[in-house]
Structure formats: structure tokens, C-alpha cells
Image (tube, rainbow, N blue to C red):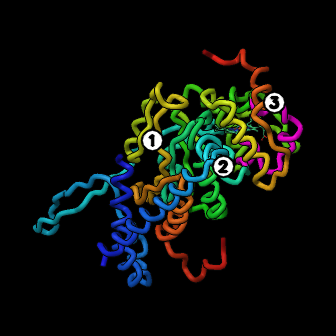
Amino acid sequence: MLVKTKFLLYTASIVALLTLTRCFYSDKQNEGEQLYTQYCANCHMDDGSGLRNLIPPLAGADYLENHRDDLACIIQHGQTGNIVVNGKNYNQGMPGFEHLDAGQITNILNYVQTNFGNNNPRYSIQEVEKQLFKCRHLLEH
Amino acid sequence: MIINNFRLYLSAALLGLSAVAWQSCSSPAEQAGGLPYLGERQLVQREVNGQQVTDTVYHRIPDFAFINQDSQVVTSLTVQDKVYVTDFFFTTCPTICPKMKSQMLRIYEAFEDDPRVMLLSHTIDPKHDTVAVLRDYADRLQVNSDKWQFVTGEKDSIYSIALQYMVSAMEDEEEPGGFVHSGAFVLVDQNRHVRGIYDGTDPAQVDRLLRDIPTLLPKKKKKDAGKN
């Protein structure tokens, strides 16, 4: 009885895993979502809600519109110091992701700008490259 | 690794025990018996009326003393007679900590008004996470220090108590943020026995933890049922 249930559980989870990985990797359009889940969701949460007054939200954040032109550099190099999002102060520090290239950053930003209830304009890779050019002096290597 | 073994052990034990618990939940003596005792156990012989009896002594968290976000000393007495959930984190953690904290908040909210349950989060980066830093962190989480203690202390005492909770925590320059640590939530009973280890980044495991906590709490007497 016990063995049978465990066996069932394991089979079920393996099947679920296989199904999940299949749809993760077969659809290139989902790169933005994949990268978000991998690098951002730990802090900003899967639904972009953030964490109380520690981590600012991405869902419905006025910051995404007001600072549209700074976002690529924030992802590449991180951010420290006090910022205001939807009228609340945040000051916790976000690490940079220097290994992400302009294409990956474009996909992440487009995912963020068009999910969690957000409906902001998308970025072209040229736009992101232009932003990153402004902060290239921050690259360590 | 260790956690994985325990998880296996735990899920196997839970499956088995849930069948038993099903029948015995009406008897108060069994009420606290649904969850396994984790960690090493010792068999101790003693004599009772000339007869040899063997007692099982379960792994128990030793006495400890740390400082919390209000600069108050938090010791084993603080958690005396309480069920508590504990974890290890650091405020600048670039990886799993915010997720752990958002899950810990679920526990906080579920037991906010029950003084029999407490939360205890240890920083594993005491050099950076001073009392002031922990104070700010707790304030931004908007939680009350009676219920949720954030503690710091001597690095060695923190790392050695982590081992007692069967949680990995150590410095490692190769790791993001400079520390290796697990996302485990450890459930500890009123006698400081470890009764469960859960992945604090997995909402499904935290669901289970939320169901397990009440099984360790004494059943309220009829006449007290209206209070609290």
C-alpha cells in the first residue's frame, strides 16, 4: 500500500516534470518568462508582487513607466540606494546580472512590461542596446 | 543532501503515519504523536523497581542565546513551551531568501494570534546583519518581534546551531552572496525536538507545514475554546 502510493507519487511527479520541461524548452518565445523565473522571481515573486516594503513590486509599478530608459542598466548592473515605487520607499539593493546579453535583457523586460497586469510598450533590442551603451563603464571586465 | 534524505524519510514516514493518525486523532495522548522525531536518537538504560527499562532519547536542540532585532536576548527560554519554526538567511541574499520570507509570512499570518507558535530567523551573516539591519528588515516586513524574532550572534554559535537543526549554513566565496545555505524551515516542538524539515521555497511544502503545526499544539479545553 505504502510502496504503491510512493511509486504512484514518483511516477506522477516524473511525468509532471517531463511535461513541464518540454513546454519550457520547446517555445523560444518564452525566454523572457524562463529568465524571469530563473533570475528575478526569487525576489520579485512569480506574480511580480514583491515583498512588503523590502522588495518593490513589478506588477502595476509606476517605476516601469517613469524609468523606462533606465531599466536595462538596472538589470545589468543592479541598483542600490533609496527608490520610490508607487509612493513607497525601498532601499534594499538589487544585484546586477552582468552575464545577461542585450537579447536576454530585452526578453525579460518585455515579459515584465506585458505581464502581471502590466500593459506597457515593448522594447526593441536596439533600444536596449542603446540603454546599455550608457552604462557600459560599469562593466567590470 | 541531508535535507533530501530527511525529506524522503519524512514523506515516507508521513504517508505511513497519516494512516495511523486517522484513527487516533480522537485520543489526546496521540495528538502530538503524528509527526516523526528527526535526528539521532539514543537508547538509555535505566532501572525501575529492579527492572531494566530502555528509554529513547530524541535529538534535542541545545540551549542557545542570541540577540534579536530589538537588542533583546533570545534564549531557549524564549521558546520554552512553544512550537516554533526556524530558518537561516541573510538580508543581502541574492537568491532564495525573499521567497523563503514570503512563505514564512504565510505562517506568520496563520498563527499571528496564537501565542503558542513562534518564528525564529537566524542570520548567517552576522558581520553585515547587525541588530540595526535586522530591525530595518523586520520593519519593512511589517512583523511583530514577539512573534517573529530575527536573531544574530557569534558566527560560530549560529553555524553550530544550524547543524543541530540539521540545516546547512556556511561561508563560501564561490556562492552567490558568499554563503551556502538551505531554504529549509525546521519545525520544533515544545521540548525542542525537531519534528519536520520543509523546503521553505516550495509553497506546497509550506502548505503541509501549516497543517502540521496544529498537530503539535495541545487541544484546547472545552471551556477555553471561546478564548483566543
Tags 3 and 2 touching, CB below 8 Å: no
**Nearer-the-camera pick, A63 or B117:** A63
> In this figure, which residue is indicated by the disc labeled 1?
B64
- Residue type at the position of mark 3: Asp
Q: Quadrant of residue B44?
A: bottom left
Asked which secondary structure carries label 2, the reply is: helix
The residue segment tinted magenta is: A50-72
Q: Look at 43% across and 79% down and name the residue there.
A: B28
Asked which secondary structure carries label 1, the reply is: loop
Marks 2 and 1 sit apart, C-alpha to C-alpha, by: 52 Å
**In the figure, is residue B92 to the left or right of A56?**
left
Q: Look at 68% across and 43% down and name the residue there.
A: B138
> In this figure, which residue is indicated by the disc labeled 2?
A29
Which x, y percent locates residue B29?
A: 39, 77
Check chain identity for marks 2 and 1: say if they share one.
no
**Nearer-the-camera pick, B107 or A54:** A54
**In the figure, is residue A2 to the left or right of B80?**
left
Q: Look at 37% across and 62% down and name the residue there.
A: B10
Q: Look at 32% across and 53% down and name the residue there.
A: B39
> In this figure, which residue is indicated by the disc labeled 3?
A70
- Residue type at the position of mark 1: Phe
**In the figure, is residue A65 to the left or right of B90?**
right
Give the total of numbered labels.
Answer: 3
- Residue type at the position of mark 2: Gln
Residue B28 to residue B148: above or below: below
